[in-house]
Image (spheres, rainbow, N blue to C red):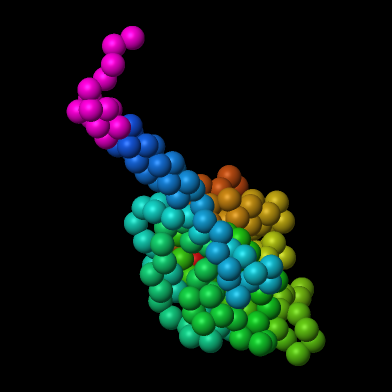
């Protein structure tokens, strides 16, 4: 086997170091591309999952029983728990169990954190009569949706499942993607629902 000159050893060593650096950089980039887990004091479990670098930001309106209600810009892939945390966290009287904190946020969505009523349940809970004013799609229960004319229990369940799978509703118009809701029903829902 022929012996390598000193300059050849230096060149081969430099190539080996360059390849090693490229490999380390690729491994780091691959490891940081997935979701990252972060501590979140606003959630009951202490964790929230936020995707990193997933596209354009989303702008959401956080209202209800939070310390600083308002409109906030969050990274794509953020969840409801992240929006509540950004709004200063839930107030002491908040009924966090009434909302899906794991749902993905959609641009233009309103997140309403209901207050707990004196009886210990969420203030937005509905009895046999329909509530006054529009119902928020972001936190409505199957029972609340069932009180609206044109929505039965099966369609109400489909709406909640759609919301959970798609991270909420940015607009009432998204309801037309749910089977059982036609044009006539859509028009009656506009006055009774808000995103």
Q: Is residue 59 magenta?
A: no
- In front here: 180 or 103? 103
Q: Quadrant of residue 117?
A: bottom right
- Residue 142 higher or lower than 43, as above or below: above
Can you name the residue that lies furthest to the right here? 119
Q: Residue at x 68, y 78 (%)?
A: 95
Name the spot of residue 118 as percent of width and height, x first: 76, 90
Point 40% across, 45% down: residue = 29
Identify the main secondary structure in magenta: helix
Horizontal and vertical percent for residue 64? 56, 82
Q: Residue at x 46, y 66 (%)?
A: 109
Please indicate, yes or no, whether residue 171 appears anywhere in the rendered image: no
Would residue 90 be seen by someone viewing this image from the given angle? yes
- State whether residue 153 is above or below residue 71: above
Q: Residue 59: where, in percent of width, then height?
A: 39, 67
Coordinates of residue 8 in the picture (x, y in percent)? 23, 25
Residue bounds of the magenta highlight? 1-15
């Amino acid at each position: 086997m022929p012996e390598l000159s000193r300059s050849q050893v230096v060149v081969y060593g430099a190539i080996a170091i360059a390849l090693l650096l490229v490999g380390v950089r690729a491994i780091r980039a691959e490891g940081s591309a997935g979701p990252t887990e972060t501590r979140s004091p606003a959630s009951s479990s202490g964790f929230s999952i936020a995707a990193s670098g997933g596209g354009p930001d989303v702008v959401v309106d956080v209202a209800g029983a939070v310390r600083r209600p308002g409109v906030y810009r969050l990274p794509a892939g953020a969840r409801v728990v992240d929006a509540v945390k950004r709004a200063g966290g839930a107030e002491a009287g908040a009924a966090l169990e009434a909302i899906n904190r794991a749902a993905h946020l959609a641009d233009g969505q309103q997140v309403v954190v209901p207050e707990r009523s004196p009886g210990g349940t969420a203030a937005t809970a509905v009895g046999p009569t329909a509530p006054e004013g529009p119902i928020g799609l972001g936190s409505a229960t199957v029972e609340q949706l069932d009180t609206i004319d044109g929505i039965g229990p099966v369609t109400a369940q489909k709406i909640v499942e759609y919301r959970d799978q798609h991270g909420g509703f940015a607009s009432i118009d998204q309801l037309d993607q749910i089977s059982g809701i036609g044009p006539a029903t859509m028009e009656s829902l506009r006055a009774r629902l808000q995103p």
